[in-house]
Image (cartoon, rainbow, N blue to C red):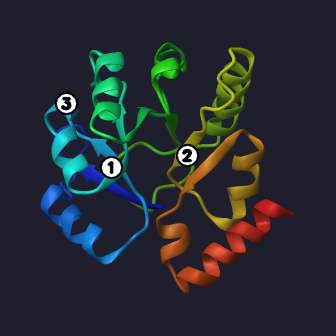
Amino acid sequence: MLHVDVMDGHFVPPITMGPVVMHSIRKITSLPLDVHLMVTNPDHHIEQFAEAGAAWISVHAEVCHHSHRTLNHIRNVGCKAGIVLNPATPLTFAEEAAEAADFILLMSVNPGYGGQSFIPSFLRRSAQLRNWLDNHHLSHVPIEVDGGIKVENAKEVVQAGASVLVSGSGVMHGDIAANIKRMRQVIGE
């Protein structure tokens, strides 16, 4: 899967890409596109990104005032729907949206700039959320993690309950294929 960070310069500082660029990406890859909307008004962008080829779309609980409605909208346009929590956002936001979500994305850095250091409290949060999901008959809901994921911490992230790992600089610096292969090996050990 290819993770696409969409930032509006309001919810998080940098501005990245919009649906036109993502549509171009869709033309050159058959990989599923995982669109992470780090934007102030995610409801205004869902249909455009679905039409541009998104397979997964996630929105931040911090700006999503009607999470169930938004998650259902994402599903209605044919995409998997995810709720995202920043590192300091209480896990109850994910718990309340979990039944309407296909996945939950926990940030392990503050959203925005790439190359940030992994926040260790993610491990506790992920384990707590995984336990809560499992105890509430929601074991099928995967936890995705985004931020600071490298070969050195990938195994402990998976052990803490995450099953979808987003890694930017952790795989992009150096030989991408070799970095991905090594990360998979470490997780499997």
- Residue sitting at x 23%, y 37%: 11
The picture places residue 7, in percent across and down from the top left corner, at 23, 49
The answer to whether residue 9 is visible is no
What mark, if any, has residue 19 been given in the picture? none
* Residue at mark 3: 43
Q: Alpha carbon of mark 3 to alpha carbon of mark 2: how far?
A: 22 Å
Helix, strand or loop at mark 1: loop
Crowdedness near tag 2: few (<14), some (14–19) or many (≥20) residues, C-alpha within 10 Å: many
The mark lying in front, picked from 3 and 2, is 3
What mark, if any, has residue 112 been given in the picture? 1
Query: Looking at the image, is mark 1 or mark 3 earlier in the sequence?
Result: 3
Is the residue 153 above or below the residue 171 in the image?
Answer: above
Amino acid carrying label 3: it is Asp
Amino acid carrying label 1: it is Gly
Q: Which of 48 and 111 is in front in this view?
A: 48
Query: Looking at the image, is mark 1 or mark 2 earlier in the sequence?
Result: 1
The picture places residue 31, in percent across and down from the top left corner, at 43, 66
* Residue at mark 2: 145
The picture places residue 92, in percent across and down from the top left corner, at 53, 14
